[in-house]
Image: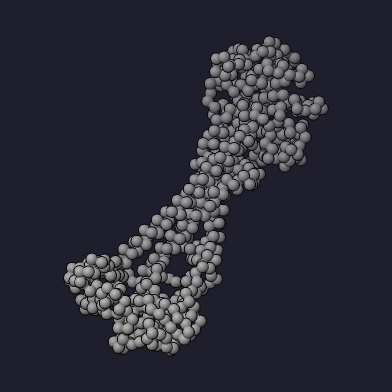
Amino acid sequence: MIETTDLVKIYGDGGSQHFQALYGVSLRVEAGEFAAIMGPSGCGKSTLLNILGLMDQPTSGTYSLGGERVDGLSDRERTLLRRHRLGFVFQSFNLLPRMTALQNVCLPMSYAGLGGTERRARGADLLRRVGLGDKVTRTPLELSGGERQRVGIARALANRPSVLLADEPTGNLDSRTAVEILELLGELHGSGMTLILVTHDRGVAERADRILHVKDGRIVEDERLRGNGKR
Amino acid sequence: MMFSEPLRTGFVEIWSHKLRSFLSFSAIMFGVAAILYTFAEVNRMYERREKAMDLAGPGRIEIREDRDKEVKDSGLSKGLTIQDAAAIRETLPWLYMVSPSARAWLEFQHGDFKSDIQVEGVSLDWRKRGWVYTLRGRFFDEADVRSAARVVILDEPGGWAEEKPFWAQWWKDTDFQSFVKHNDLLGKTVFLKHQVFTVIGVLRQPPKDKDPRWFRQGGGGSAFVPISTAQRYLTSSRRGDAPNPDAVDEIIVDTGDVMTVPGARRAIEALLDSRHRGVKDFKIDDFREMVQGMLNRMKEYAVAVLSVGIVAILAGGIGIMNVTLATIFSRIREIGIRRAVGATRLDIIVQFITEAMLLGLLGGVAGIGLGLVGLNYLSREGSEQIQSLVWWHFLALLGISVGAGFLFSLYPAYQASKLDPVDALRYE
């Protein structure tokens, strides 16, 4: 379960050069829920996702992950939580170009200290699950956009996280490939994973159980599309 | 975290940027090669010192003339003489060797060939130490010395056992050496200072690359005659200021044992002081001082080469630091990705330090290779020097180069770890 209360994020020194991205955001996403954060560019949705993904810290407010307060944790503590409990999927895939698909997927596992054999076996299995069982040795440059995003999803699942955070995961894909990726994310959600997806595309957001509309750093609407979030 | 990932990434990065990597570790490579050379040189010199000490005699004491004009003018002392040598022998009969010698530059003539050479008058004891020659013919005997026979032994250069190294191309034999080398003069008559002498022996030097002597003992005459002969026929008028037919240039003494040197030295000094009426016109050095002097010079040389090596390694380290800093700027996004998927700041530090240490290791390995090749092809005693190296030399060199990589990547790695993951991911 993810819960935030009055999250504020101010960039800069707080003086004349500062910029406030979030204005007291409070939200609650239940375990196993699929929530979309939707809003126009610059509304603060990526900032919110970065804070939820423990990549960034709020200036004020509280954040609980699985019932445990995680705001104010040290960089190392946040990194360890991110490593084991959160998975990230990026709009621009963010794969390391000199690594093969398998090596990219194995990267989070190597930081988690998994042995080489187990790492490779789990990585290959994940790539099979996302439909790339025959492309484990390809580098990102040898893969299509959709395939790269599948590798990105497999990597996000590497350490068996409970929450998957996706920042415009279909933003760089054509519509057909985007549908495939959304179906894949839907399958993951179907298997019980909490999924938080950031998008500015209503069509993408409608795949979620609910849409949190963000505007000017505030959640202006919590639109529930289906279910109660508990599965 | 596992070290396999930083290692793997390190290899990939180095392989992907071969030229950049080579340039960054090349200074370390040269530094390591210089230090390896120093290790080999110093080790070999220590080995040679041992051999040279055995050869020259562990109880060696050298007594030489040391007269300044004032002393000469005083007329109190005749300087170092053959009688001094006899007195030493008489007073300290247990000495293994008492070898006086006198030298002079004279004209040598055989047929049409003429050349000025250094002739050394030596006693029978002379051959007891430092004998590295191959003798054709015979050495002087008691009768030659007693009768001041006009017999001469010529010195023949030994050449090179193996191919002459390229740096020794300028090392040419003198005209006299070439003449002795190419003409068999054994048993022939030659002229020394226009007087007839018979060549009774030819001393062939060991090959230059196999010469066990650390330094040339006895001054290296080109021809040897009995000391009595030298004094009677060749050297008696060489000192225009104070003609003294008994003068000798030096007396080499060997006690036979390094332990007896201090006592013998004191006794000789006291004896000569009384014989020279307190005039300090001689100088006594014992082998320990000479060895120490040589060792000191060797140390200075080693320190100089080591300094060059250390400076090169420091330069290499700074090169690695520079490259690592540049690498970080080109890999900011990668750092962001790694941080996003779970790399801690320490993981990032380890990543960049590992890469720099790999560069250092490559520099070390390449430097050892370069040093060995250099020793083998450029050094006169390359193979012996290489053999004198021991495992810890290589380990130390690798440690130094890997250590330089470690040390000089700390700051860049720390900088990399400080990058904010969100900013790093946004970096284009």
From this view, report whether residue A105 is shown above or below residue B238.
above
Q: Is residue B315 visible?
A: yes
Foreground residue among A111 and B160: B160
Look at 27% across and 67% down and name the residue there: B66
Q: Position of residue B262 (x, y in %)?
A: 25, 66
Colouring method of the image: one colour
Q: Is residue B14 visible?
A: no
Look at 33% across and 87% down and name the residue there: B149
Q: Residue furthest right?
A: A176
Q: Quadrant of the C terminus of chain B?
A: top right
Side of A147 relative to A62 (left or right): right
The image quadrant of residue B295 is bottom left
The image quadrant of residue B75 is bottom left
Count up the numbered dots. 0
Foreground residue among B181 and B314: B181
The image quadrant of residue A50 is top right
Q: Position of residue B387 (x, y in %)?
A: 49, 64
Side of A93 relative to B132 (left or right): right
Q: Position of residue B103 (x, y in %)?
A: 34, 76
Foreground residue among A36 and B13: B13
Side of A214 relative to B235 (left or right): right
Q: Position of residue A168 (x, y in %)?
A: 72, 24
Look at 65% across and 27% down and name the residue there: B426
Q: Quadrant of the N terminus of chain B?
A: top right
Look at 46% across and 54% down and name the residue there: B305
Q: Residue furthest top?
A: A220
